[in-house]
Each structure stands twice: as C-alpha cells, then as structure tokens.
C-alpha cells in the first residue's frame, strides 16, 4: 500500500502482453480482496472529455434554481433528475449535496404484474436550459462502460472463471450516473456530504474534481482519506460482487466529508450493474481462493439481495423518501407490514 492508503492499478497493462496482463489481474484480485477500493489509471478516458464533463457539471449547478427544479426528482417515479441540497439520505441522515441522477433511457413499465423493481425503469429528466448535457453524458457513459467491461473480464479470469463470465450473466447493464456537487460547510467538520455506506451493485467508477478531497474509506475500523490522484478513477466494488464471491472480495464502507466553506467539490460516480432482473450466480472459486472467502457481511438493517433489482430498489426507497412516499406509498406500506 502507498501513502495514499489505496493501491494504484494501471489498466493499460492489459495491452502490454501476457505477463503484464497477468500482473494486473493479480493486483486487481489482491486490491479487492484486501480493501475493496483502488485507484485506476491508464483507462484511455481523455483529459479533454473529463474537462468537458467537469465544465458541464459546473454549468448545470450554476443554473437558476427554477431551471434545476424543473427537473426535480419528485417529478419522476423512476428516481431520475435533480435532487436539491439535503434531499437525499444515507442510513436515515441527510446528505449535504445536490445532484442529478441519470440512468438508461427507457420507457416506463405499465404492466401491473411487473416486479416492484421495474418501477426503476423509465425516462430521464434533462434540463432544457442545458441541452448539451445529454450528449456529454452519453460520451461519458460509452467510455466508462468500456472500462467497466474490461475490469469485469479481468476479474473473471483472476477468480478462476471464464473471461466471459460476467458478460454471460449480466444481461443489459443497469447503469447510473450521478453528477454531484458538495457545497462547503462552515460548521465544525466532519459533516456528512454523504454518509457511510456500501454500494448496492457490482462496480463503481468515481471521477473526482482535481485537487478536491473528502472521500474516506473504512480500513481496519478507521477512516482513511482517499485523495484524488491526477488522471485516476477511484474504483470500488459493491455488495453484489461480495455476494457472488461469498466474501472473497469485499464491499467496503465509504463516505464523503463536506468541504469547508467557501470551497465546494464536484464528483461523478458511474455505477455499472447487472440487469434489474438478473440474479448474479455465486462464482465457483478455485480451492485456494475459496479457503479465503470470509462469507457475506450480515447486517439485519441492510440485507444483501442476490437479485440486483431488489438491491437497487431497496437503496432508492431509502435514499429518497420524498419520491418514495409520493410515487410508491404501496411499496413502503408492504415493506412496513413485512417487517412487523
């Protein structure tokens, strides 16, 4: 481990011959077995695209309040659109950030017999005052989807499975892009930019505004800083990959501490997950790896579902109680009854 507290991996090793590719897979397996987090360089994502995304994010959050609220997420039963500062919660506590959530562009499901998680499918809400945002997000989605698939193929081989293992079992990926702004706080720190949590899916690629800290990862019971590294994404695995490996790989708690006023911070997490109706099977690990599997974390307040749609819906209902109460009161009532 470096003084950065997280290892740095270079994806371009996969293009430098069999020995370099094998070294990358070993490093990938070790990082996500030991920590669940790492920095990733060599992705091929250009500084020019990063700069355009950053500029677009800044321009969105600089829009007049009425333009942002025109696409507020309470207008979307699919949890898409703009969330005002303080409008999201982690473990019941308010997160001090504003954001826009963008998922796959789909038509809403109207079949009354569809599973509950089908309510997450639907159209995005785009700001009329910033028509160029949609095209930039589409480029970002395409580039990071390539990176995510390369990582999953490398993981499959590193875990003793066929290279196509995740491709074969993923279906059409459920992706989510959050463009987030953490405003500064002048209260005593730490303040909850986003509270401690584990991601509910498989893989997260996080772009952080250059020079802006705040991300912390839990290691050995302590919070350690994960400052931005120039040209790198912060990568972490989610609960489904822990489930699929029965705890050989580990999903790790992380949080963001608010910057001190007048500073603020832009970050853009990209979540790459299976289709909502996909149940990721447990990987048959080689004997030497299986012996090191720790089992899936057991937390009664946060059960891990093997079906991704159930995991995703659980997270969205908790994070956005105003949207849940407005559009999905029946689901909240059914869950309240089931827990009695």
Image (tube, rainbow, N blue to C red):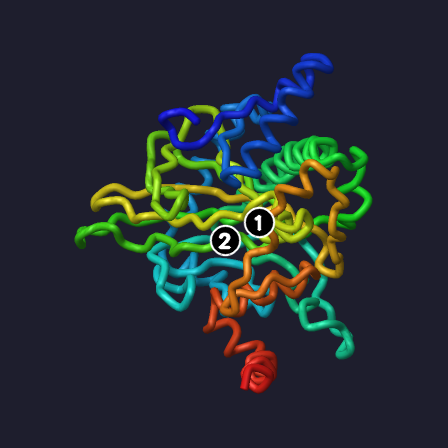
Tell me: residue 282, above or below residue 48: below
Tell me: residue 215, above or below residue 98: above
Q: Nearer the viewer, residue 135 or 229?
A: 229
Residue that appears at 73% across and 72% down: 115
Residue that appears at 79% across and 48% down: 169
Mark 1 vs 2, N-terminal side: 2
Q: Which of 134 and 128 is in front in this view?
A: 134
Q: Nearer the viewer, residue 213 or 261?
A: 213
Is residue 216 something that shows in the picture?
yes
Q: Quadrant of the C terminus?
A: bottom right
Is residue 175 something that shows in the picture?
no
Circles 1 and 2, Cβ within 8 Å, touching? The answer is: yes
Q: Say which mark, if any, is on residue 198.
A: 2
Q: On the picture, is 57 further left or further right than 19? A: left
Tell me: residue 300, above or below residue 159: below
Q: Quadrant of residue 64?
A: bottom left
CA distance separating discs 1 and 2: 6 Å
What is the x, y in percent for residue 18?
A: 73, 15
SS label for mark 1: loop
Residue that appears at 60% across and 40% down: 135
SS label for mark 2: loop
Q: Nearer the viewer, residue 167 or 240?
A: 240
Q: On the picture, is 142 further left or further right than 132? A: right
Residue that appears at 50% across and 78% down: 325
What is the x, y in percent for residue 141?
A: 62, 40
Q: On the picture, is 32 further left or further right than 278? A: left
Residue holding disc 1: 238
């Amino acid at each position: 481990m470096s003084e950065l507290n997280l290892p740095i991996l270079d994806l371009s090793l996969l293009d430098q011959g069999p020995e370099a590719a094998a070294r990358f897979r070993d490093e990938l397996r070790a990082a996500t077995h030991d920590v669940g987090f790492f920095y990733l360089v060599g992705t091929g994502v250009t500084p020019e695209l990063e700069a355009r995304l950053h500029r677009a994010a800044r321009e969105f959050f600089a829009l007049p309040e009425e333009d942002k609220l025109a696409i507020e997420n309470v207008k979307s039963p699919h949890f898409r659109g703009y969330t005002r500062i303080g409008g999201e919660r982690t473990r019941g506590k308010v997160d001090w950030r504003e954001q826009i959530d963008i998922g796959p562009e789909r038509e809403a499901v109207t079949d009354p017999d569809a599973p509950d998680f089908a309510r997450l499918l639907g159209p995005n809400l785009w700001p009329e005052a910033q028509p160029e945002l949609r095209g930039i997000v589409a480029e970002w989605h395409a580039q990071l989807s390539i990176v995510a698939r390369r990582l999953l193929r490398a993981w499959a081989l590193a875990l003793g499975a066929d290279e196509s293992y995740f491709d074969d079992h993923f279906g059409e990926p459920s992706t989510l892009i959050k463009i987030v702004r953490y405003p500064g706080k002048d209260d005593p720190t730490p303040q909850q930019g986003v509270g401690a949590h584990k991601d509910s899916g498989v893989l997260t690629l996080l772009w952080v505004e250059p020079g802006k800290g705040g991300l912390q990862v839990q290691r050995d019971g302590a919070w350690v800083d994960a400052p931005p590294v120039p040209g790198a994404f912060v990568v972490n695995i989610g609960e489904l990959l822990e489930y699929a490996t029965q705890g050989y790989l580990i999903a790790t708690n992380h949080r963001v501490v608010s910057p001190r006023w007048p500073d603020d911070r832009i970050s853009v997490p990209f979540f790459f997950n299976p289709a909502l109706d996909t149940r990721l099977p447990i990987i048959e690990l080689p004997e030497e790896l299986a012996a090191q599997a720790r089992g899936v974390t057991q937390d009664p307040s946060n059960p891990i579902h093997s079906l991704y749609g159930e995991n995703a819906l659980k997270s969205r209902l908790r994070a956005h109680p105003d949207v849940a109460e407005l559009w999905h009161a029946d689901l909240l009532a059914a869950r309240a009854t089931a827990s009695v």
